[in-house]
Each structure stands twice: as structure tokens, then as C-alpha cells.
Image (cartoon, rainbow, N blue to C red):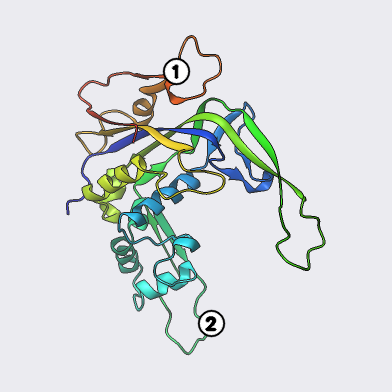
Amino acid sequence: MSLLRNKVDFVAFVSVTMANPNGDPLNGNYPRTDYNGYGEISDVCIKRKIRNRMQDLGQSIFVQSDDRCDDGCKSLSERAKLGLKGIKDRDEYEKQACERWMDVRSFGQVFAFKANSNKSKESDGPASASVRGPVSVHQAVSVSPVEIHSMQITKSVNGDPSETRSSDTMGSKHMVRFGLYKIKGAINVQLAQKSGFTQEDAEIIKESLSTLFENDTSAARPDGSMEVCRLFWWQHDCPSGQYSSAKVHASVQAVKKELVDVPACFDDYEIVMKELPNLHCEMIDRI
């Protein structure tokens, strides 16, 4: 497999219809918005979904969610000890971690775990190690302000006989009526060469982004409520890139159509793309 040699930039437009794309746990799981009412999806949330898709595509993942654990490990430290047992040299530790787990060589990882408390035993590895990953992802922001719909919900039965609350106890569910979110990101060649990130890995990132919401169903995100409507993928012809990432990302914009007051679907927007000479763009439409 060949190391990535040319810089990559990408933009994805994601539609959200009557779903909660990323609830804020400090605000009653209310969909994240900024002070101007624009919806937000954190970069951590997006990377979690990319990791899940990588795992679905058969890749080995270090930061696994509990409900997707495929190796029986109950913590990151346990997974690191199992996969990198006996490696004391920090450089070799980082190298083996990158080779073993795709998300480590993609996004990077800090390995900082407690030392073995039993001093009579050998150390499980270096006290700390870190990898800088080449794949960077911005937090997604909606193209227009979003309207949040809140619904009161009830319990039909108590969960435990000891509960004294009535079965009609009230709760709330929050959803974005409709929002079109823009995800931006890039892949840095210099960091890719350090972590061993390959051209084949870049293709897996592309596949993961284009199918981001497969196997991601939940009560907050029913099937069909979130969709990658269009993915733009630029691969430059040199390591540093023909244009800056900021210029590439700004070359694609979603503009509300003239006769549309309140957007209700992806077709209420027009995708406007500014051509960047000598830079090829691959467009993947409505996955």
C-alpha cells in the first residue's frame, strides 16, 4: 500500500429532518445551536460516526463505542495493553499503534494510562505516547438557522415495581425540523507519512463519509432522517496542495433558492461551486 502523497480536502452536505443530530448533554440533550440559531454537530460526533463506518468496513478501531466492541476489551487501556504488549520504546509503540488501528493513524491518539501499580512487574509500555493524525474534521454548522421542535412524551409503564411515579410521567424530546449542515475536512500529507496513512485509507475515509449514517439508527435519529446529500472530494496534485483548505472549502456553498422562505428539504438550496483551475473535484451525489 502506498502512502498518501497528495493533499485531500472534502466537504459534505448533510440534511437533518425531524431528528436530533447531536444533543447537548448539559442542556437536556437539546440539539446544539449557536447564539444566532445555527445548528451545530461537534467534530467529536462526526469522528465517532466515521469510526463506526470504518469498523463496518472491516477496519480495526482503537476508540470503539461500548455497543460496538468487537474484541472484549472494556477500556482503552485494556485494548492498548492487549494490542501493544511488551513494547517499551515510545517510537515503536506509536508505530505499532498506527499499523494496528486505522482510527489512530487517521485521527491520532494520546496514550496516557496509569502505570502498573505492582512494582514487581514490568511496565506495560511507555508512560505516555501520542500520535498526530492527518485527518482533520471541522464541527458542522447549518447553512441556515434551524427551528427546534420539542415534544412532550409519557411513560406507558413503570420500569421497576419499586417506582412510585405514575406511568404518565412527562418527558421531552427535541428535534430539528429541517437543517442542512456543512461538514469540512482535510487530510495532511506530512502527518500521513508519519502515521503511515495510505491512499487506500483515504478511499476508506471517503466511503465512510459518503455512507455516514448507515447503521446509525436511534430514537433520536430514525432511518432516513439524516442523509449525506452531496460529498465533494478534492485530491491535489502535490503534497502541500494547490490551494489552501480554507479556499477550497469556501469554493462550495449552499444558497437558499430565491422563492424559498423557510427551507424544508435539500432541494430548497442551490449548490454553487466556484471552479478552482487545475484542481479536480469528485462529486458524489445523494448516497
Q: Nearer the viewer, mark 1 or mark 2?
A: 1
Q: Nearer the viewer, residue 273 or 213?
A: 213
Position above or below: 207 against 109: above
Which residue does the numbered mark 2 point to in the structure image? 117
User: At label 2, which amino acid type do we have?
Assistant: Ser
Residue at position x 47%, y 9% from top?
Answer: 258
Q: Position of residue 214 (x, y in %)?
A: 40, 46
Which residue does the numbered mark 1 point to in the structure image? 255
Q: Nearer the viewer, residue 263 or 241?
A: 263
Q: Position of residue 9 (x, y in %)?
A: 32, 35
Q: Are marks 1 and 2 in contact (CB under 8 Å)?
A: no
Q: Is residue 56 left or right of residue 219?
A: left
Dot 1: element: strand
Residue at position x 42%, y 70% from top?
Answer: 79
Q: Is residue 277 left or right of residue 59?
A: left
Residue sticking out furthest to the front: 156
| Precedes in sequence: disc 1 or disc 2 | 2
